[in-house]
Image (tube, grey):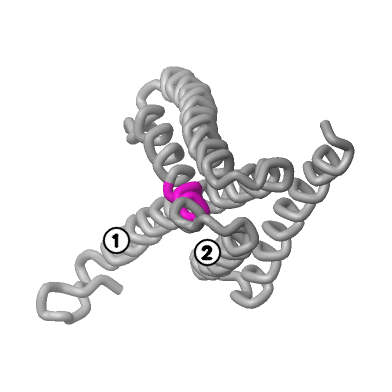
């Protein structure tokens, strides 16, 4: 039943409240999808940059080498994410435009913006990548620097997993554990394999 301004049931327009509820739920769903995409982008930036820095650090313990490699990874990853998202949304937009042209008289709807999607994707990736970079940028001792990168990355991964679980309405503990373990696996594999290069003298 629809409610009027005073909070009473509007018997003349019983379908009005249903329309409002549908519109608000669609708006919230779209917003949740954007937020979840941002969390996933930040998680990707964090894991890939931290893994890259640890991989370089496994071969060359110099602080500058780790930071420069991490910054290069931030730039390359953000550009890659932006271009990939731009191309993907452009394709989606073309399909939707073609569908609207076939449907003819159907009401026009808002089309996705490739530029907005690309900017959001690049920004999310950069935010995640900055976490290990800022953590390692001011630490001279090699062992401490590696430990701080792993520790900060773990804390950030747990936070991203928690936010993703809330947005996706899934169990928080399971989501956090999955994200953290996945990040650890990526960092461990990269560090371990690159350590072989150092051991072999390459």
SS assignment at label 2: helix
**Would you say residue 23 is visible in this rendering?**
yes
Q: Can residue 36 be seen in this view?
A: no
Within 10 Å of the Cα at label 1, are there few (<14), some (14-19), or many (20+) other Cα atoms?
few
Residue 114, by quadrant, is: top left
* 130 magenta-colored: yes
Q: What residue did someone put label 2 on? A: 156
Looking at the image, residue 174 sits to the left or right of residue 202; the answer is: left
Which is more toward the observer, 181 or 113? Answer: 181
**For the magenta stretch, what is the residue range?**
127-133
Q: From the viewer's perspective, is 1 left or right of 193?
A: left
Residue assigned mark 1: 20
Alpha-carbon distance for marks 1 and 2?
37 Å
Q: Is mark 1 on a helix, strand or loop?
A: helix
Q: Position of residue 152 (x, y in %)?
A: 54, 64
Vertical placement of residue 190 versus 151, above or below: above
| Residue at image point 86% right, 43% down | 199
Please tell me which residue is depicted at 30% across the width and 74% down the height of the picture. 1
Dominant SS type (magenta)? helix
Disc nearer the start of the sequence (1/2): 1
Percent from the top left, x then y, of residue 29?
A: 44, 56
């Amino acid at each position: 039943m629809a409610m009027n301004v005073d909070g009473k049931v509007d018997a003349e327009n019983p379908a009005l409240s249903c329309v409002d509820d549908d519109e608000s739920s669609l708006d919230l769903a779209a917003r949740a999808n954007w937020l979840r995409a941002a969390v996933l982008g930040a998680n990707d930036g964090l894991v890939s940059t931290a893994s890259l820095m640890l991989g370089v650090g496994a071969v060359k313990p110099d602080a500058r080498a780790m930071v420069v490699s991490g910054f290069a990874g931030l730039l390359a990853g953000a550009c890659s994410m932006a271009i990939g998202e731009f191309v993907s949304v452009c394709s989606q937009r073309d399909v939707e435009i073609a569908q609207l042209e076939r449907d003819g008289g159907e009401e026009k709807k808002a089309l996705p913006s490739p530029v907005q999607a690309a900017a959001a994707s690049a920004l999310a990736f950069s935010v995640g990548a900055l976490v290990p970079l800022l953590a390692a940028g001011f630490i001279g001792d090699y062992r401490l620097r590696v430990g701080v990168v792993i520790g900060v990355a773990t804390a950030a991964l747990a936070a991203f997993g928690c936010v993703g679980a809330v947005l996706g309405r899934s169990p928080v503990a399971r989501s956090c554990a999955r994200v953290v373990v996945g990040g650890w696996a990526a960092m461990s594999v990269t560090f371990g394999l690159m350590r072989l290069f150092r051991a072999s003298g390459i």
